[in-house]
């Protein structure tokens, strides 16, 4: 399933190693995550669901969905899509007997709803007392998810406290840009990112970007990540902490775990939250079946690790992500059965759609996926036409032959940290969900806390870069850095972004932003 | 007779439950929602092995109620009685444990002293070097506080009580022998008003002009991701204040005994996370690899002399039912609620006389 050649990406695989999956040796390459290596080896069932023991597989590939949690070297609940393989690693599936693939408890899925509708464990077998006590014991045996820890992890833990003018959380386009522009004017910057590389989701964007001339249009996403990183590296007042998961903001202290062993506490004067977004999923029958993936998850698999997601895919959603993904799949030699789109017209840019159509992929507008089928993994799907009231047109169902389904129905801001700081939030559908109120300099209702990129509202990487620039410069200026030159660039940056959004594709964003602008602005 | 209960925690709801069971007209006012207060935020350890002899009879009685109430209200509290371990990590605290056990035995609690090595019999991964002495009581365990609140609320409703959530009491006025309660722009008349508002009791008391001055205590708790059933008893280290057990869903839950604060505050701190994690991995080293999933804080109150404040006050019809204190609210509340209901119904109840607000 590993790609040997690709028209755009040259996969440099590391040394071959052997990992052990439920005791069986599996070939892997250094630089691959456990989840990617297992996928390449044909493993599809990664875990079993908490209660019903339904098969669960790979989904998001960025540590958000928790479907890939396994026991690794005796430590339970490890997100295998975020941990890189090491020779001799012992990996076991959880919440299943004997293993996730052949779980005896899968029978529960067939029975449980009939006997225990959701929440009924509080209401069944309550008297007599002995029966209740016996049943409560049995229920407890079934509870719990991860394997019991086998040993004490062999790590020396450390604690580091540091100070920073600006702490930037997230090393994607928004965060990188914020760090660059705060550092440029002399602020001491700490950039924290959970991955072992910078660039966030750019690293799987193998396509060329659009936009006006000077916004890196025509450059491929992977290259943009490199350009930004090179730019950031010029400044020695930037401390970059990769593999650092920020888990909380306490007052103005940003707390994270670096390399799974060090507790890092950054006492920051300004914070830029650039945590990006989650992939949304869609409700349809069997949407949790292994083989139903987030579009981004498939991009990671294919464009970062060079692993084919399957032989024939069905794409749900014809936004730019769905269209670009289709093209990328075809580039990698994977067949795409169809794209379905619930709206009456294609969501993404015409050029992308035209390209996909030229390659013979049908796009069904006013269609939706009704269900996926298959025992332990996707073996096909049923799609159907929708009427004006979004109901399925009877008799229009048809089967699509495919072995994986990509859900490309948009993103939701990853806004947990905004709740930690107590930022005022608002539901703005145009921006993808709950987003923070912000000034036009991207400062939230909490003084000194900024947002940049998808966490502020789902948009494009180009806009994220521009928002990061604004947040970075503004935070530096308010700390007394930069002087007139910085103020001038800030004005320019704000104007740039306004221009960028002025086109027809920015209309929706502008409309959404109007609903969440804070009037009170920090005077400069 | 009409009774208002302010605060739908375990104390308020158990009082409401037993009052309504006797056919009394009860209305419960909850400022936010069920489980908002300490009853929804604690870790569910229940034991009669507590440090105040005055409260032990009520803890023992509640343990019995926890056996019978689920059938009565038809709701499973997910109680598991697999013991409660107290640890002492200094010689001085070891003495305290010994004195406590001696006292507890006199009051009919079957607790006993054991060596840290003995603890491994029920918690195989316990590190015996983390303590110098332990005490243990089999007739204790862990309850899931949420169904306790839900179940009591269900029982209240079954007997005709009304539970008003999102109904903060804004003002209380006295009018002859009646008390008038203002909430959400409405006005209600009652014969009795019970102040079971936990950490908010001081504020409620002030509305009728009574200075209560209970200590407000803030406590922080956290859970890890879920693992298979692994830790059965409840473990409480009296030296560090750290306690830990496993929830019904498999998360490792624990916290640190709270500290007095000036005002109500439910913000989480990183200091807590650090202190807690450090101590817990000494107690059970294999927990070191687990990821903390959530942390939160809650507030409760304690009477100035460490005992609950329960009974009639100088304001006719205004009844205190608060100040339950550290590590025991969940285990004394059902019995205290039952006794308080009797006090309101009959006008007297000698069993809870020692908690009379006038002693303060």
Image (cartoon, coloured by chain):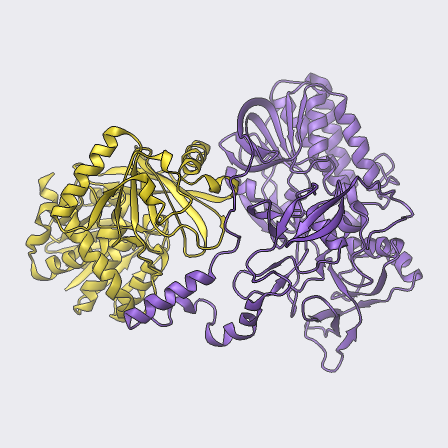
Chain colours: A purple, B yellow
**Towards the viewer: B279 or B190:** B279
Q: Seen from this angle, which residue lies furthest right?
A: A358
Q: Is residue B224 above or below residue A288?
A: above
Q: Is residue A197 above or below residue A343?
A: above
Tell me residue A493's x, y (percent).
74, 31
Tell me the quarter of the picture where residue A105 sits.
bottom right
Total marks in image: 0
Considering the image in quadrants, where does the C terminus of chain B appear?
Answer: top left
Q: Is residue B103 above or below residue B44?
A: above
**Towards the viewer: A95 or B320:** A95
One can see residue A264 in this view: yes
Tell me the quarter of the picture where residue A383 sits.
bottom right
Report the residue at 33% width, 58% height from top.
B80
Tell me residue B119's x, y (percent).
33, 44
Considering the image in quadrants, where does the N terminus of chain B appear?
Answer: bottom left
Report the residue at 68% width, 62% height from top.
A290
């Amino acid at each position: 399933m590993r790609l040997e050649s690709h028209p755009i990406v040259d996969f440099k695989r590391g040394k071959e190693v052997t990992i052990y999956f439920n005791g069986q040796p599996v070939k892997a390459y250094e630089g691959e995550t456990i989840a990617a290596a297992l996928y390449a080896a044909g493993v599809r069932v990664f875990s079993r669901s908490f209660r019903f023991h339904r098969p669960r597989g790979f989904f998001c590939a960025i540590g958000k969905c928790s479907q890939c949690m396994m026991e690794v070297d005796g430590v339970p609940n490890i997100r295998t899509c975020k941990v890189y393989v090491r020779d001799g690693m012992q990996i076991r599936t959880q919440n299943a007997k004997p293993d996730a693939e052949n779980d005896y408890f899968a029978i529960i899925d067939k029975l449980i709803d009939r006997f225990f509708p959701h929440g009924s464990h509080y209401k069944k077998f309550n008297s007599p007392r002995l029966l209740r006590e016996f049943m409560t014991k049995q229920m407890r045996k079934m509870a719990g998810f991860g394997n019991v820890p086998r040993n004490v992890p062999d790590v020396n833990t450390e604690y580091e406290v540091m100070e920073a003018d600006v702490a930037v959380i997230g090393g994607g386009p928004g965060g990188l840009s914020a760090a660059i522009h705060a550092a440029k004017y002399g602020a001491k910057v700490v950039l924290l990112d959970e991955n072992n590389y910078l660039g966030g989701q750019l690293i799987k964007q193998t396509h060329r970007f659009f936009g006006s001339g000077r916004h890196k249009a025509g450059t491929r996403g992977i290259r943009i990540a490199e350009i930004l990183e090179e730019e950031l590296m010029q400044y020695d007042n930037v401390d970059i902490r990769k593999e650092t998961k920020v888990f909380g903001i306490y007052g103005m202290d940003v707390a994270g775990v670096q390399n799974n062993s060090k507790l890092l506490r950054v006492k920051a004067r300004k914070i830029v939250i650039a945590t990006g977004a989650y992939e949304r999923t869609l409700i349809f029958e069997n949407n949790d079946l292994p083989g139903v993936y987030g579009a981004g998850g498939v991009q990671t698999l294919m464009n970062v690790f060079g692993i084919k997601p399957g032989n024939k895919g069905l794409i749900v959603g014809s936004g730019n992500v769905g269209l670009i993904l289709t093209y990328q799949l075809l580039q990698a030699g994977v067949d795409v059965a169809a794209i379905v789109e619930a709206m009456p017209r294609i969501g993404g840019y015409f050029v992308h759609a035209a390209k996909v159509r030229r390659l013979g992929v049908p796009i069904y507008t006013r269609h939706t996926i009704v269900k996926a089928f298959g025992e332990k993994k996707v073996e096909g799907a049923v799609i159907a036409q929708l009427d004006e009231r979004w109901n399925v047109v009877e008799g229009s169902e048809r089967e699509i032959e495919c072995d994986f389904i990509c859900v490309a129905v948009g993103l939701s801001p990853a806004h947990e940290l905004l709740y930690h700081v107590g930022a005022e939030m608002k539901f703005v559908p145009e921006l993808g969900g709950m987003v923070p109120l912000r000034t036009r300099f991207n400062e939230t209702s909490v003084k000194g806390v900024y947002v940049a990129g998808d966490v502020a509202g789902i948009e494009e990487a180009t806009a994220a870069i521009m928002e990061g620039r604004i947040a970075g410069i503004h935070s530096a200026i308010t700390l007394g850095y930069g002087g007139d030159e910085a103020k001038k660039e800030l004005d320019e940056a704000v104007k740039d972004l306004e221009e960028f959004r002025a086109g027809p594709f920015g209309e929706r964003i502008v409309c959404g932003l109007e609903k969440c602008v804070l009037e009170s602005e920090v005077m400069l | 007779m009409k009774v208002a209960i302010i605060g739908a925690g375990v104390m308020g709801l158990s009082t409401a439950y037993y009052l309504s069971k006797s056919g009394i007209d009860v209305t419960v006012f909850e400022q936010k929602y069920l489980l908002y207060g300490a009853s929804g935020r604690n870790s569910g350890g229940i034991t009669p092995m507590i440090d105040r002899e005055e409260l032990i009879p009520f803890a023992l009685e509640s343990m019995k109620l926890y056996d019978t109430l689920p059938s009565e209200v038809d709701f499973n509290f997910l109680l598991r009685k697999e013991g409660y371990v107290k640890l002492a990590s200094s010689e001085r605290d070891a003495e305290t444990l010994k004195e406590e056990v001696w006292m507890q035995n006199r009051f009919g609690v079957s607790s006993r002293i054991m060596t840290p090595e003995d603890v491994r019999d029920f918690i195989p991964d316990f590190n015996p070097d983390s303590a110098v002495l332990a005490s243990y009581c089999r007739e204790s365990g862990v309850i899931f506080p949420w169904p306790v609140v839900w179940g009591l609320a269900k029982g209240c409703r079954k007997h005709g009580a009304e539970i008003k959530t999102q109904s903060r009491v804004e003002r209380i006025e006295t009018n002859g022998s009646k008390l008038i309660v203002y909430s959400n722009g409405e006005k209600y008349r009652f014969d009795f008003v019970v102040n079971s508002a936990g950490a908010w009791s001081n504020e409620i008391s002030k509305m009728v002009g009574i200075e209560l001055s209970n200590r407000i205590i803030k406590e922080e708790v956290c859970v890890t991701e879920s693992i298979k059933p692994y830790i059965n008893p409840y473990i409480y280290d009296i030296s560090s204040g750290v306690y830990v057990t496993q929830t019904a869903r498999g998360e490792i839950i624990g916290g640190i005994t709270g500290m007095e604060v000036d005002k109500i505050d439910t913000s989480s701190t990183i200091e807590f996370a650090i202190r807690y994690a450090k101590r817990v991995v000494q107690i059970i080293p294999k927990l070191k690899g687990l990821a903390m999933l959530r942390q939160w804080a809650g507030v409760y109150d304690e009477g100035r002399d460490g005992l609950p404040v329960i009974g009639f006050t100088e304001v006719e019809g205004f009844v205190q039912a608060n100040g339950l204190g550290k590590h025991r609210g969940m285990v004394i509340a059902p019995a205290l609620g039952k006794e308080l209901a009797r006090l309101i119904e009959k006008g007297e109840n000698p069993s809870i006389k020692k908690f009379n607000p006038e002693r303060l």
